[in-house]
Every structure is written in structure tokens, then in C-alpha cells.
Image (tube, coloured by chain):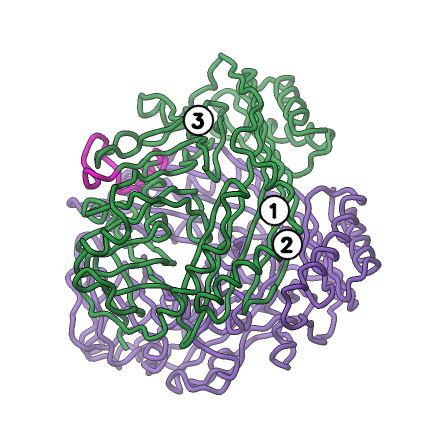
Chain colours: A green, B purple
Amino acid sequence: MDIEGLNELAIGTADRLGAEDAVALTSKARERMIRFANSSVTVVNHVEEAEMMVYVAKGKRRGIASTSNLEPSGVKRFVSDLFASLKGLPQSEYASLPDAAKKYPSASAGFDRKLDSVGPELPDLAKRAIGASLKAGGKRSAGVIEASTVSSAILTSSGTKGAETRASIKLNIRSFAANDASGHGLSCSATLAGFDPEMAGERAGSDAKRMADASEPQAGKYRVMMSPTVASNLIEIVGDSASAFSVDAGTSYLTDKLGKKVAARQFSLTDHGSVRGGLGGRRFDDEGMPTKSVKIIEDGVLSTYLHNLTTARKWKTETTGNAGLVQPHAWNLEVGAGDASYEEMVREMGEGIILTSNWYTRFKNYRTGEFSTVPRDGAYLVKGGEVAKPLKGMRVGDDLQRAFSSVQMLSKAREWIEWWEVSTPTLCPWVMLDGITVTKAYE
Amino acid sequence: MDLEQAKGLAEDALKRAESSGATYAEARVQGTRVREFVLKNGEPQPSFFEEGYGVGIRVLSRGALGFAATNSMDAASVKDLAARAVKLAGASSSILKKPIKFDSSKAAKAKWAPKEKKKIEGADATWLREVLMEAEKRIADGKAGVKIPGRIIVILAGLDEKYYVNSDGAKVQARIPRILSFCSLTAMEGGETAQRFIQQGETGGLEVVDRIGLVARIEEEAKVMGKVLRNSRKPPTDTLDVVLSPELSGIAAHESVGHPQEADRVLGREGAQAGESYLKADSIGRKIGSAEANVSDDPTLPNSNGMTPVDDEGVTGRKRRLIKDGYINEFLQNRVTASEFGVESNGASRASGFDREPIIRMANTFVEPGDYTTEELLKEVKHGVFFKSFTEWNIDDKRLNQRYVALEAYLIENGEVKGLVKAPVLEITTPRLWSSVKARSKKLEFESATCGKGDPMQGAPVWTGGPETLLAGIKLGAR
């Protein structure tokens, strides 16, 4: 049975049991991956997974369940068990699904069928990335290429129906040279034609070579130029903080800031449910509502939180098409472009630090937005508007509102980022911030 | 589908992989059943449950490793997948520099489960709700002495059932029931906020809730937040001693000892993700700390969160003395890294689900207890800060430069614990930290945590722990 047929079975069962609201969202995913380290393959992965998520509500009681047992008899039993479990639950307020059904005609825009068949060529793609790194000065490389195809279908008890398929390919390569110096490169694309393993390998290799004689900076406050990779890591938390669930839960620094300035005027952030080039998202959210482009921050001012039907009801507003049945979330984030080139930004910065990659961002307090993160790979001190020397052994920290209120410049060129440290696909430019705290370890 | 039905699929997959040309093969079926309940500011969120079975197959072909998984549990699909894994692995050998080998560890034949007095299957929605409502009752409306406008409390009752076979003859069956709780508390007073994330849990049945005092811990943490908001003063900036609580000793052991001593990181296998290590293959025997620095990892602790007496490569686990009397003593090994190092696997391989390859993981990592009572240890401190709990923390990817920001911390003067200090920061290199260890208390306590590693990401349940650990001659920072 195909995934749309399985949804019919689940919703039919829920209807017969007397559910007032029901949603069935079924997906099938194929993930193909090659991992390498020391320029040698370490493992190839091939994972095929199917999952059905069902939501039922009756008499102010709600339950959600997921199963991978997609035999028709298993689906019927699963929905019946879920419905029966409602009896033990307390009542709570929530918004019902709208009566009007929405139909999403099948669409293939944004789905590159060539990506669906990628698999046997993964070793060659890895070789190309490793080769480009070697040529640029990397001595050995570690990394991963992942091609994934996900088909999703939704059916609600109101008759809302939709299905679509998306695919993406991502490379994360890290190269090493003398003294464990390292560089990092990414290529993330929704099309095979847009995938560029050589570009990512060249970046990783050249930064690894340039980092060989890195030294520690003085602790203090700096202008910092963040690559799209680094900035996206922080932007993801801005997106999470815009979820109405985070605001209610006390884990958002954007609490009480609707309509207020939360960033510099040149900073804008939009979430797209479905966008050309986007690595994720859908045309419908988990409640069957249409996703759209939602301006979260416009010219530095917080425009909206991200809502599902239930949070929208609480906040007396409309859903933004960002359900999550429990937690609204971003789909594809886009930071507005600036008008500067990378070179102009370095020149304008005068003195400061360039960061190309980071990891391990952690918060002292999500309510205040106080964080620190650990730069790695290419990092450079800039003096007199020119790169002066490579840097290592530092940590940067701030609070998110102060940091994004200090935005000085944004690059015109932007890149899609999604990797180990950024799970929400983000289209992001280089971002120059001012007054960022740099600390070092006690030795 | 139940485990008995799924076992046959594992056996079939193994046979097909071998007949397809695999020089080594293993198959693991894993069933997962989760019941979860969430309260947000006292409002019940939709209850959640998850169930499913899947099979993961790992093979060696032409010296290269392949992993394939599916949750489509029909015999034909599983056999096809096994053959596909062999084909994909073999094809990838075009960029293989050195054939991958498994060591000759003894293949375990075992059946294991933690003690479980009240079956985990009893965790229905009503029971889960009652546990959380009791916690909510104790902290809502300022009952813990402070307003906590942001409260997320989650309880989860999970059951993993696994059956594992490999071509070396291992046959392992496990039933792993577990209770986990996550709690996010945001307290506010006088325009200031404090935030605390608490994870509690261990393997076992429903009795875990009472055994670990799950509800009382949430109440106690809430009370502390009020004190922190009202009474904290700036931390001292001069050179002083630091006492790490079991919670801080545990996170330091996990981050700056356990991770850099994972042999796969030492060999570079996680280079593009979680990173490599400041230690090299020849670092065994290197002095890294004082004679008081002793850190271990033990997968055999009964009912621990990281309990893994037999790992996901069919190897019987044992306690690993990672740092012994200040020297790097051994790494965490799986069968592949053990083969590289010329040692035997110490049973550190785990997979977080059927759809993940097994990789090297810590189990329960801790600073070994010493022989001081807590009072005796504190008496050693003339001027210091006692780090009781932490919020923000991170470490560089070689595991040399780490930072812990305290939530609850106290000044110590002449052996006595004085007032609270606000957000002191311990930002320190790994050699400095472990070289500064002067004494350890007898107390040994553990915290539950979820360790992230791998690509695709794998969250592994672990314990981190230790005694109170005295560090001498430290300079702190402040937030």
C-alpha cells in the first residue's frame, strides 16, 4: 500500500472510532551516505525508513503516536490503541482543525529526480572533494556525503490532502595539514547540478594549509566576521526562539519583544515553508495548513512568532503554517543579503577576527540569549583591513540580541547551509558583528 | 511484530550477507516502544507514543565497511538489503587506503537486562501524568519560593529490545527498560532570570521514579534557583581553589577524558563531525594529571543509564580505567580500532537505534572516588569556590579547552561554605584541569545525560559522575 493509501486507512479508522480531529502524516525516506577519514572510506550507509505519525483528538483530549509497522492490520490496531489511550488523559485547550479541506495538487517543483538515483557515484564524489583539498594544501580529509529523498503525504479528518517529494545532497569536508591545522568546507544543494564537491574540498584544503602556524589571540572584544556556516549556527537558535512554544516555555530571548527592535536595521530573517533551492520544508505543515514565507524579523524588528493552530489561538492570531503539532518550528530560514563583497567586508572591518566554522554552541540561559561557541578550522586576525595571521584556541560569546543588534555589514553572496551543527536549512550571507567577547582557557 | 518474530529476520540477513560475499557480517533487530508525557506550565501537551521494529546490517566486503537498515520487516526486503550492503561496501573500496579489520574478541552468547521490579509496560498515560502533576504541584505558583513562569517537564518510559548475531558466532539478546525525565525551569525575580535543565533517569522499571527521587529533585532544583537569584555575588578573580561537585566532576570526566580517549576519534574517524583528539595513538602512558587524577568508564554498573554489559558488536564489556594515577591508561575500543591498536575490544560499541551503525561510546564515565569525607575535603580549602551545578558548557573538538559556567556556586573561606557567587566560569585546558586535582571525596554520585556523536547523529544514554574533586590554584572568569 502506498503512503497515501495508508493515510486513508488511518483516518478512516479514526473517523469510525469517533475522533473529532485526526491527522495522518506518513513519510518514506531513503538516505545514502559515504563517510571518509584520513582520505579513506570508513563506511557507506544505506537506510530506508517509513513512518506514520497520527494525531487524534476528542473531548479536549489529544494524543500523537508514530509507528513504523505499516501493515494495514498494524495501522488499524495502532490507531485504535492511540484512540483508546485518550481516556487516560487530562483535558486541555487546543484549536480544532479547520472544517474547510485544502487540496495540494501534486507538484514536483524543487524535486531533482537525478538526486533520487545518486548512490553508486558517492565514492567518486568523495574522491573529487578529497582531490580538490589535496591540491589546495590539505594533507588528509574527513567528511561525509549524504543524499536523501523524502516523500511525505498528509490526510486530515477535514479532508485536507497533500503529498510531495524532496531530495537534497550535502557534503561536509574537513581537511587537516601540518600541526593538526584544519579547514572546513560545505556544499549543500537541492539539485545535483548545484552540488560542488571541488569547491568545498578546495576551501577545506586551503584553510588547513593557511592555519599551520596559528596562534592564540588576546582575550577581549572584537569585530567578528562570521561565515555563512558560523552565522547559520546562531540563526538556527533565533529561529527556535521565534517559536511560540519556546516563548511560552520560557526558553526564548524574543519573549515580550513583538514589534520591538531585536537586531540591527539591515538584518532581516524570513522562514520559507517551501522555496526554490531550499533543502527542506513542505507546502503543508503537520496540521495540513499551507506553509508560506513568514517574515520573522524585518529591518531589525520582530514581526511575528511562528505558530501552529493551538499557539495561534492562545496568542489570538493566525497560524503561520509552522506546525509541529506540539512545537511550531522553522522550515527554511533566509537571512536577507547585504551589498558587500567578502573582500570589502574584510577591508571595512579594519581590525577583527574572521571565523569560518564553529561547534558546540551552548547557552547559559535561552531566556536571556547568553551563549558561547567554539571556533574551529579557518580563523584569522585582520589588521589594517587585511588578513594578518591564523588564530586558534579561543571561544566567542555574547547574547543573541546584542550580537545581532551589532550587525555592521552583510555580504551580497549567500550560501545554503545544513550540516552537523545546523539542522534547519539556512540561506545565509557573511555577517559582520561588533563587540563580540573572545576568551581563552586558563593554562 | 515482536522480538521472537524479528529474530528470524536477523538470522536470514546474516546468511544472505555471507552468501553475497561478506567477509564479516552482523545483523541487529531492534524494537523500540516509548510512552511520553509533557507538561508545559502545567498544561498537558498531547501525549506521545512510538513503536516500531527495524533491522540494521553491517558487513565487510573487499575490506570496506557497509551498513544498511530498514524498518520494512518483510523477509524479502531484509535479505535484499543485506545483499545491497555487501555490494555498496565492495564498491566503495575504490577509495579505501587500508582494509578494515575486526579484532578477534571472543564472541558473546548472552541474554541481559537490568533489574526491573515494576514492568515498564505499566507506564500508561494516566501513570505518566500523575508523576508529572506531582512535580508541577510542588513548583507552580511560587511554591518552591520563587516564580517559575517557564516550566517544561517531560517523562518518558522506553523499552528497547535487541537481538544481535554476527558471523563470528555472537548471539546477544537484550531487554532495556528505561525511565527518563527532562525538565526546563526558568525562574524570574527582580528582573533577573535563572535557567536550569535537569535530566534524570536510569535503566529499570517504574520503580526508577521513586528510587531516584525524580519529583523531589525537581522541587529542590527550583528552590535553589530562587536562592541564586536573590543572594549571588560576584565571584572572586584571584587565584583560588575550586571544588567540583559530583555533577561537575562528571561532566569534566565525560568531556575532557572520555571523549578524547575514544579510539575512533584518536584515529580520526570522527574528524569532520565531533572532531579528533589531542591524544595520539602513542599517547598511552602519557602523564596528563596529578597522581590524584583517576577517571574510569564502566558499562557494567547495574541499572545505570549507560548499562551495556554486552555491546553492539557482541563483545562483553568491562570497566575501563581511562586515567590511572595521572597517566593515560587505555582508550575506549571497538573491534575495528582494537585491531588497529593491536589490543582487544573493551566492549564500548553501541548503536542508538536499528538505523545507526555501532560506534564507540562512553557508558558511565566518572572520576574515581577518593578517601576524604566532604567535610575533610572542604577543610583543605582556605579560599575557593564550590561549583555545585552548571548551565553553559562546551569544549573544543580536540578536547583541550573547556568551559563550565556554574548556576549554583558558593564561596569557601577557611574550610567553610559561605554565600552564593554568581555564574563563575571555569575555562581551563585539559592538562591544567587534571594536573590541578589535589583530593577527592568518598562520595560517588551520577547524573543522567545524553551524549551526541556520529553522523547521522546518535544520542546515547550515559551517566556522568564522580566525587567532590578539589582543584588547587585556579583562576576563574565571570559571565
- The residue at which mark 1 appears reads as A31
- The residue at which mark 2 appears reads as A45
Callout 3: 10 Å neighbours few (<14), some, many (20+)? many
Determine whether A20 is above or below A220 in the image: above
Q: CA distance from mark 3 to mark 1?
A: 25 Å
Residue B250 seen from this side:
no
Q: Circle 1 sits in a helix, a strand or a loop, which is it?
A: strand
- The residue at which mark 3 appears reads as A291
Question: Residue A94: x, y in percent?
Answer: 42, 24
In front of the other: A394 or B230 = A394
Q: Circle 2 sits in a helix, a strand or a loop, which is it?
A: strand
Label 1 with label 2: CB-CB less than 8 Å = yes
Residue B251 seen from this side:
yes
Label 2 with label 3: CB-CB less than 8 Å = no
Q: Given the image, on which type of amino acid does mark 1 rest?
A: Glu
Pointer 1 and pointer 2 on the same chain: yes
Image-based side of A346 in relation to A270, left or right: left
Q: Chain of mark 1?
A: A
Q: Circle 3 sits in a helix, a strand or a loop, which is it?
A: loop
Question: Residue A435: x, y in percent?
Answer: 17, 55
Which residue: 53% across, 63% down? A131
Q: CA distance from mark 1 to mark 2?
A: 8 Å
Which residue: 66% across, 44% down? A48
Q: Given the image, on which type of amino acid does mark 2 rest?
A: Asn
In front of the other: B360 or A56 = B360
Q: Magenta segment, which residues?
A: A243-267
As for residue A67 lying within the magenta part, the answer is no
As for residue A253 lying within the magenta part, the answer is yes
Q: CA distance from mark 2 to mark 3?
A: 32 Å
